[in-house]
Amino acid sequence: LTLFHVNQAAESGRRNFSKKVDKDVMYGTAGFREKAEALDYIIYRMGLLAVLRAKYKNAAIGLMITASHNPEPDNGVKLIDPHGEMLEVKWEKIASALANASDDKLEEVLDDIVKSESINMSREGCVFIGQDTRPSSPSLARAAVAGIKVLSGLPTDFGVVTTPMLHFFVTCRNTQGAYGEATEKGYFTKLSTAFNKLCASVKLSGNYKPHVFFDGANGVGAVKMKALAGYLSENLSVDIYNKGSGKLNYMCGADYVKVQQRAPSGVPAPPGERCVSVDGDADRLVYYYVDEGSVFHMLDGDRIATLIAGYLMELVHASGLAINLGLVQTAYANGSSTHYIANVLKVPVACAKTGVKFLHEKALEFDIGVYFEANGHGTVIASEKTTRLIKDTISKTEIPAEQRSAAEGLADVFGVINQTVGDALSDLLLVEVVLRTKGWSIQDWLGTYVDLPNRQLKVTVKDRRVIQTTDAERICENPEGLQKKIDELVAKYERGRAFVRPSGTEDIVRVYAEADSQENTDRLAALVAQAVYQMAGGVGEAPTLP
Ligand code: G16
């Protein structure tokens, strides 16, 4: 039976989804990302792999078709493991090997996976599929379904959904409904019920106004925000822009706002008003506003992390529970945010490599782990022990009412949070709850600490793999001498810091710098970019100084 299926899968692959690209591709931090026209054979093969993974784990696996923040002509695919987590590292390698196999080696590679992983092929191979709004997504979803069916898997196609929704559905299914109901309605109901309950317990006060301007990046976030808004009653009103008539992520969306440090086009918010941008698959968000003097102010993932961690810390203290709470950032975290978290909030901070799976893994070391990338991708997770502790505390009658009410608050907060992965819609509701509780405007929130000026640049090189890093990407080990050069440059600037790393989602090297003034920061970033260009095989136009 196995041999028959494997032969069929290879045969159908050769016939309908032949390998078009010679260059090797790699399953990176966000799966495979390529130009859409070079993806159908990869996605067909990922359909096959998802079935094998589902049979191996004896659980449903997710397959999401998206290139998230990348431009519209790109697309991508990533697999979601049974508890909503990213694919296990060992299987990332298997995925790359399968994607790179020549057409005539398909049987061999598939057979190898089945044998080396001892996969019981008679098990059910349930695969949940989702897609973003890219024009290329529907036909790529068909390629995935073809791959799933040829190995006798069971595809469930959710159509256009956000990436975090698919993570949620997979988790619901594999917990037999304990995490929630694996439908759109189930997702919206879970989040909004907890949100509405928290709002009901806090009267409107201070400078908080329950209204946001929402930039949907012309993607799925706009569609799903509209649906979610219908569940929020008067607790939050949302004006949605960039709903899909323009190009996806073009001059809008969370990545544009964060990297360009400017407001998106298409959002006519009056000065001072609280605005929020999500990315192409709605797994990240950043807040911003433009003041009376037309100056742009951003509240990115670091700000969201500090707001949430501070709030949770207050609840933990009030509950009197022995819960150790920590925050995980990446090298991109603004130096001021790390200082504020460690010294003002007194919350332990850890640093992880870019990529949700690395942050998630580190966050598991705490009872409650808050993790956020500066680009707005993050969430909060609680260990099973902590969840149980909170639940038990609520049921105790002998403890003081304030302690019980804080424990109830914690439980409700976790109802709003999508613990499976960073989720722009869930994070938005959580931020709104905290601002409402504190009676804060976006200006009050910004006032908690002052960001160091920062700049991100991209450098194109012949092969970005020549850049190798260590110490959570803060030190560059290769090419030789590059780190020494960066150190020399950084030393010339007050509060200077810079690092370089190869992107996992685009064919470029990223440069990050911060320093005491924007002018110095921009100069430092450009000098580091020039060093990368010279020492790591830059191609095209060399970076220029500002
Ligand atoms: C993905 C990853 C994020 C990462 C981002 C940029 O986000 O999930 O962890 O920060 O790519 O990665 P890189 O700098 O390696 O290109 P998304 O929103 O594009 O899925």
Image (cartoon, rainbow, N blue to C red):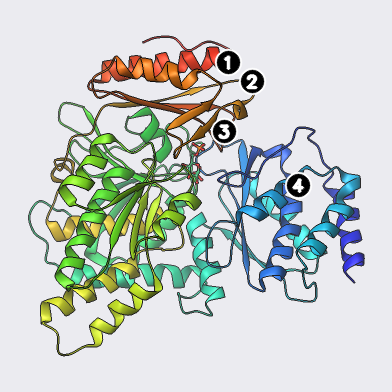
Q: Real-space Cα distance between discs 2 and 4?
A: 23 Å
Q: Earlier in the sequence, mark 4 or mark 1?
A: 4
**Disc 4 packing (10 Å; few <14; some 14–19; many ≥20):** some
Q: Quadrant of residue 418?
A: bottom left
**Cβ atoms at labels 2 and 1 below 8 Å apart:** yes
**Cβ atoms at labels 2 and 4 below 8 Å apart:** no
Report the front residue among 158 and 514: 514
Q: Which residue is mark 4?
A: 97
Q: Nearer the viewer, mark 3 or mark 1?
A: 1
Q: Which residue is mark 3?
A: 506
Q: Mark 4: which amino acid?
A: Ala
Report the front residue among 59 and 131: 59
Q: Mark 3: which amino acid?
A: Glu
**47 lies left or right of 385:** right
Which of the image's four quarters has the C terminus? top left
Q: Real-space Cα distance between discs 4 and 1?
A: 28 Å
Q: Earlier in the sequence, mark 2 or mark 4?
A: 4
Q: Is mark 3 within 8 Å of ligand 1?
A: yes
Q: Secondary structure at mark 3?
A: loop
**Residue 348's spot in the image, x, y percent?**
27, 52
User: Relative to 481, is 265 above or below?
Assistant: below
Q: Which residue is mark 2?
A: 462
Q: Which residue is mark 1?
A: 538
Q: Earlier in the sequence, mark 3 or mark 2?
A: 2
